[in-house]
Each structure stands twice: as structure tokens, then as C-alpha cells.
Amino acid sequence: MNRVGARKYLFSKKIDSYFEGIYKGYQFALRFFKEAFTSPFHLREIINQCFEIGLRSLPLITMTGFIIGIVFTKQSRPSLENFGAVSWLPSLMGIAIARALGPLVTSLICAGKVGSSISAELGSMKVTEQIDAMEVSAIDPFKYLVVTRVWATSISIPVLSFYCSCVGLLGSYYNVSTEEATSLQVFYTNAFSNISFLDLFSSMTKSIVFGFTIGIISCYKGFFASNGTSGVGKATNQAVILSMFLIFLEELIIVQIVNWIRYF
Amino acid sequence: METDKIQYGNSQDPVIKIEGLYKSFDELDVLKGVDLMLKKGENLAVLGKSGTGKSVLIKLLVGLLKPDRGNITILGQQLDKLNRKELNALRLRIGFSFQNSALYDSKSVYGNLSFPLTMNVKNLTKKQVDDAVEEALDAVGLLDKIGRRTEELSGGQRKRLGIARTLILKPEIMLYDEPTAGLDPVTCIEINALIVEMQQKYKTSSIVITHDLTCAKTTCERIAMLLDGKFLKTGTFEEVFETEEEQIKQFYSYNFTL
Ligand SMILES: Nc1ncnc2c1ncn2[C@@H]1O[C@H](COP(=O)(O)OP(=O)(O)OP(=O)(O)O)[C@@H](O)[C@H]1O
Ligand SMILES: [Mg+2]
């Protein structure tokens, strides 16, 4: 069997493999939807992963959320002062954090923290043949490893986003309260008065989409890692970069859609 | 699946039958027309130089890789005709011990054994799982390591745990990928004894991949030499090595001058 020269590239090796990658990723996501709603569900593993992702990220999210709340309030104050509109600060921050900052910041942090750990874990399982070992003992590794993790990120990242937004507002209140005498209650009433149901809904949708993206991309990169330990490093790196890039892209698209609905 | 098992009582049929198997990776042809037969209750050694495709061959047998051409029939079922569920049911009857053990490093020794069991057999009580784990560990002499983490095990202990992990599902066929590679002579003898014990105690049929002629001689009734992607010679130890074939003689003398 002489197969040398039998394979030709459509464009070049690099471009071909790039499009092949997109197609494979698409198939991977499709397979998730096919298998996400059929038993066995491995509920225990999903809960485990939720704790792993949620609880472990809590300190980092708390800190970042609080700091971002303070910093953004500090930065916005002078501009509002120019218009004599400092009293709008709470509602401005409410909108900024609930609509954009909360989900975005949480997802970017999780892309780094959770995404890298998922792809590194699956990648090293792949290159040490642990995934093959599952397969030969009749355990579906896609179901047990991928589906559970994607479920877990899609559930816990929205929860973390909501939490991050609350902490962010707390940070904002902390800064406001040092400058003006406002009670927490007044602050929160003001902050929430301008947030509509659509805002909350779009934020939730966004963070579910972001969570799904992080889960599916890092699982995909890990699941198809090759070339030993250096391959795992590369897969992890790519997973983080690609998730972050897609998160921004999705943010842009969802904002467009939501604005279109808002002014419809 | 149950009915298949009963039908398959006929001891004349081979448990594994491979016909005209081809496999290549990109431009590299690894297997070029492999034919092989494994009889019931028999241990068969597959010998061959590094990189000749021995691991690839047994990965094809459990469906981890797909052949380019050729037929594989295991326990009366043709592999490429099975859907995923049937394939998994068949995989449960085959034990696969990996060349590098492939232990689940996020799980303890106990977890490595209980995981395949609890995932495949529903509604086991804690006691039943414990008993099964202890029995498998006892069979490979690792009972004292039950609560340890896998990274605390030595190379030989990892190999044995890998074998125990396949035993726990009580397979009818065992595929050992280089069970003694890189181990000291004493541990080799222990593992060889383990393979023979498995054959006698659980009535398994096995394929043992090895570079090690002592291992092949002590554990297996028949030997197959894989060279150039084909089986050059199959038969008993004496049949295979009483030959004028240069490559086989080389393999033999190299092994025993060391
Ligand atoms: N997934 C793969 N992709 C590409 N090439 C592969 C793959 N798996 C194996 N090969 C190639 O197939 C050939 C046979 O590999 P295999 O692992 O079967 O060798 P082996 O006979 O088991 O050797 P060893 O005794 O060293 O384990 C090698 O040249 C290897 O490079
Ligand atoms: Mg090998």
C-alpha cells in the first residue's frame, strides 16, 4: 500500500488544520448537546465540579469584585461631579456592574482560573492514557469528564457572576460612603432602580453563555491534547486565550441583540 | 447480551479472530495484513521489536483505534458491526492492562478499583464494593496499599494495580501490554506468576505483549512474532525459534546473550 502523496491539502497544512479545528470544535459542542440531557447524568460528579469551580474561585472573585467596585466608583466620580450629578453615582454603578462588569470580570477570571485547570486536568489524563483507560472499562469519558464539567461551568459561573456583581456594588458603596453620608439601603435602592428585568435577564444569559464557552473550550482543548506534557501546556494556554477571545466576541454580539430588543 | 454469552460456550471457536488487518498513521504503515487467532483458555505471547505496532494491535482489539481494513471478531462478535452500547458491553468482558498502567492519578488505590466497578455495576452495597476491591488487591498482592495514593506506588506496584483494575470486572479475555517491561527480575517473576494464576483461577484467555522471552516462555503456550507489520511466525516457543529466519534468530540470541 503506497499512500505517499495520496493526501493533498486543500489550501495549506496550517489553514486546513485551522478549519478542521473549527469543525471539530463544532462537532464537540454538538455532541455535548446530544449527551447533556440523556442518562447517566453523573449528578455527583457535576456537584463535585460545581464545588470545585465555585468554592475555589470565591476568594478571588470576592477580592476582584470588591476592588473593581471601588475603582470604578472612584474613577467615575470626577466626571459626574463636573455635571453636579454625584447623586447619580449609585445608579450608574448599578447599571455598569449589573449589565457589563459583573459577568465579564467573573468570566475572564474563570477563563484563567477554571479553564486552565480543566484543560490541564483533561489534557494530562489524555496524554497518560487515563481517558483511554476509562473507555476500555466501558465508561464514556465524554459523558463522565466533559458533560459534567460543562454543566458545572454553565451553572456555577452565572452564580459567581451574580455574587461578583453584589460584591462589586458593596465595594462601590464602600467608596460612596466614605465621601457622602448614604445608607446602604438608600444606595441599593438607587443602584437597583435603573436596572430592568431585561438587564438581569441579559446578564444571566451572558454568564450562562460565558460559562458554557469556558467549559466547552477547555474540555475540547484538554480532550484532544497530544504530544506529551508540552502538549498539555500548549492546550491549556490555547484554551485560556480562545475562551477569553470568545467571551469578548459573545459580549459584543449579546449587547447588540439586547440593545436591539431594548429599543425595539 | 446474556444470550450471546451462553451461545458462546463452544470451546472450538477462537475467542479472538483477526483477519487481514491494516492500520496506518498518516504516511506510516504500521500493520500490513495481520492474521491471528486466540483460542479459548490460551495465553498467547506477541513478540516484536519496539515500534512494530504491538500496542496498536491490541488497541485495535478494544476499539481504541479503528482499523483501515480487516476484520476483528471477539467472542463471536464482529467489532465494526457493533454500536457504542454493544461495544461497551463487549469491552466489559475484556481486560486491558496499559503499557504505562494509566492509573487514575486523581483517585486513590481504592478509588482506582472501585471506579470501574461502581460505574458499570449498579446498586452495589458499600460492602460488596469493598470486598471486590480487597479481592482484586489481594490477587496482585497489594492489599496493604489500599488507602494509599497512586503516586506513592513503585513502578512494579503500579503495573500490578493496573492489572488488578482490569481483574475487578472479571474479564474473559486479558490483554497485557508489556507487563514486565522495565521491572527487576524478581518482580518480573512475580508478575509472570500472576499472569499464569489469572489464567488458571479465572479461566481467562490472554494476549501478552512482551520483549521478554522468559516472560513469554513461562506464561504462554503459543508465541507470535510480529515483524514488518505482519506475523512472521506463530507456534510454540520451540517451533518459532527453531528457524533459519535471520530476524527471529537475532531476536532470540539478543534476548539470551544479555
Ligand atoms: N496515535 C498514533 N498516532 C500516530 N502514530 C502512532 C500512534 N500510535 C502509534 N503510532 C506509531 O505506530 C508505530 C507502532 O507503535 P506501537 O506503540 O504499537 O509500538 P509497539 O510495538 O507497542 O512498541 P513498544 O514495544 O516500544 O511499545 C510507532 O511507529 C508509532 O510511532
Ligand atoms: Mg507498546
Image (tube, coloured by chain):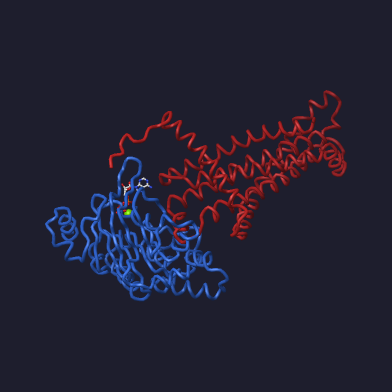
Chain colours: A red, B blue
In this rendering, position of residue B129 left or right of residue B80: right
- Between A145 and A140, which is closer to the camera in this rendering? A140
Q: Nearer the viewer, residue B245 or B82?
A: B82
Q: Quadrant of ligand 2?
A: bottom left
Q: Which image quadrant for residue B183? A: bottom left
Q: Position of residue A53 (x, y in %)?
A: 62, 51
Q: Could you say where residue A25 lies in the image, as x and y percent from the top left?
A: 53, 41
Q: Nearer the viewer, residue B29 or A168?
A: B29
Q: Image quadrant for the C terminus of chain B?
A: bottom left
**Image point (53%, 68%), residue name:** B121
Residue A229: give x, y in percent of width and height.
43, 46
Q: Residue at x 32, y 49 (%)?
A: B22
Work out whether B203 lies above or below A105.
below
Coordinates of residue B147 in the picture (x, y in percent) = 49, 68
Q: Residue furthest top?
A: A82
- Taking the image as shown, residue A62 lies to the left or right of residue A186, namely left
Residue B16 vs residue A238, the one in the foreground: B16
